[in-house]
Amino acid sequence: MLIIFDCDGVLVDSEKLAAQVFADALLELGLAITAQTCFRVFKGHTLANCFEILRTQFAFEVPPDFAQQLDIKTKHAFTHNLKPVEGVRELLADLVKRGVPFCVASNGGHDKIAHSLTVTGLIEYFPENRFSAEDVARGKPAPDLFVYAAEAMGVPVEFARVIEDSYTGLKAAKAAGIKSFFYGAASKECDQLEAIQFDNMALLPDLL
């Protein structure tokens, strides 16, 4: 069995923090969107998809250097405030002890993944087993990233398990033919995408 973790919201408690940074950055440009709206609308998407949503749903075009400026602001916020998801360190230690292979596959860039894991002290568990949407033609919700990660880890997709906190990620797992587990509050979307819901990392080993 291979466990494929999403990063933001699954390994590191970053989603609300990143949403606030995004909202503040947009406000500086004159677009007033609450952090709650950013969290709801952009969660799980690649940055390119977020910009497309801004164009189509908000009729707003970000300036050419926005991605770079947002990266700087996000790194600063993460460096000072980012924490690992509660219980995830213990979970990873248990998987290592049991010899269960795992990796991270995120829509975020490699630099962002490495920074998040380093700041939270989780990088020791992911020395090279890190995969990004930068590695494939299409990020989530396309299946490409999960299929690529499984292949790179040498495990057929039917023996992989995905741990996600976004519907974008669940859609990608379903498209890839991988059984998924949703970390968060139960919802009808979990049932529609055939995901097993849980809200405590300590429960995951018994669910796998």
Image (cartoon, rainbow, N blue to C red):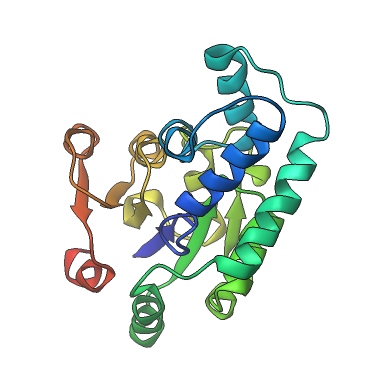
Q: In which quarter of the image is the C terminus?
A: bottom left
In the rendered structure, the answer to whether residue 113 lies left or right of residue 10 reads right
Total count of labels: 0
In the rendered structure, the answer to whether residue 190 lies left or right of residue 153 reads left
Percent position of residue 110, x then y: 68, 55
Percent position of residue 139, x then y: 56, 37
Closer-to-camera residue (78/191)? 78
Closer-to-camera residue (118/55)? 55
Residue at the far right: name it: 65
Percent position of residue 27, x then y: 64, 32
Whether 118 is drawn above or below 136: the answer is below
Q: Residue at x 39, y 50 (%)?
A: 157
Q: Which residue is drawn at 35% across and 55% down?
A: 163
Closer-to-camera residue (65/28)? 28
Whether 91 is drawn above or below 157: the answer is below
When asked about the image quadrant of residue 90, the answer is bottom left
Q: Residue at x 57, y 38 (%)?
A: 23
In the rendered structure, the answer to whether residue 104 lies left or right of residue 36 reads right
Whether 194 is drawn above or below 119: the answer is above
Percent position of residue 78, x then y: 61, 62
Q: In which quarter of the image is the N terminus?
A: bottom left
Q: Which residue is drawn at 60% across and 47% down?
A: 21
Whether 139 is drawn above or below 180: the answer is above
